[in-house]
Image (cartoon, grey):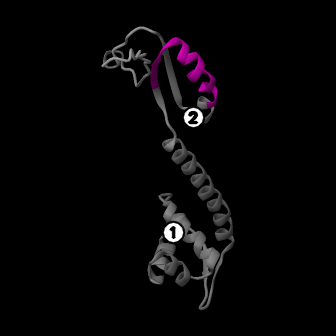
Amino acid sequence: MNYDVSLHDIKLFLMTHQFGNFSEVARRLDMTPSSVSRKMNQLEEKVGTKLLHRHTRAISLTEEGIAFAKHSAEIIRQYDLVSQRIEQKADSPRGTVKISAPVAFARLHISPFLSELLELYPLLNLEIHQTDSFMDPAQEAIDLLVRIYWYVFTGTY
């Protein structure tokens, strides 16, 4: 018995069970019916038992095929669930973001929104530096630097 069965082979098997013939599976996957049939033969060799009853007009599952389909469907469902979670995390912002802002500005305009931001993006780590002093963003590795400069217009140019 060879347990080197691919997810693709399992999906072909489940589709064959769902549609009841190789032609429909082949049409949906842009394959030939003979290649689907060949894949099913290889799958049966790998698992060491006959999974399908082949008839002239339809295909049905053997007793072992019914058990294999039940467990295979759960494997595919679990794989799809894990893949979705990984994709969601891959799209989610992650890592450390260093922010430097003046004390009053940070308290009034940044701090009130931190909990909501971290709730939305749990993989994000924020470092907030509240200071009114000058900081060199390159030397301090600051990702976002907020500084407020006041300019008083005296009316003369």
Quadrant that contains the C terminus: top left
Q: In which quarter of the image is residue 107?
A: top right
Magenta region includes residue 104: yes
Residue lying at 62% horizontally and 86% vertically, measured from the top left: 58
Residue beneath the point at 50% across and 58% down: 3
Where residue 90 appears, as percent x and y from the top left, is 49, 43
Pick out the residue farthest to the top: 133
Q: Position of residue 11 (x, y in %)?
A: 55, 66
Which of the 4 quarters of the picture holds residue 34? bottom left
How far is the residue under mark 1 from the one under mark 2? 42 Å
Which residue appears at 64% of the width and 66% of the height? 69
**Tag 1's secondary structure?**
helix
Amino acid type indicated by mark 2: Tyr
Residue behind mark 1: 43
Where are the magenta residues, as a range? 97-116
| Label 2 residue SS | loop
Give residue 154's quadrant in the image: top left
**The label number, if any, that marks residue 138 in the structure image:** none
Asked if the magenta segment contains residue 118, the reply would be: no
Residue 156, placed above or below residue 43? above
Q: Name the residue under label 2.
A: 121
- Residue 148, visible in the rendered structure: yes
Query: In the figure, 65 relative to 103: above or below?
Result: below
**Nearer-the-camera pick, 88 or 75:** 88
Q: Nearer the viewer, mark 1 or mark 2?
A: 2
Q: Which of 45 and 6 is in front in this view?
A: 6
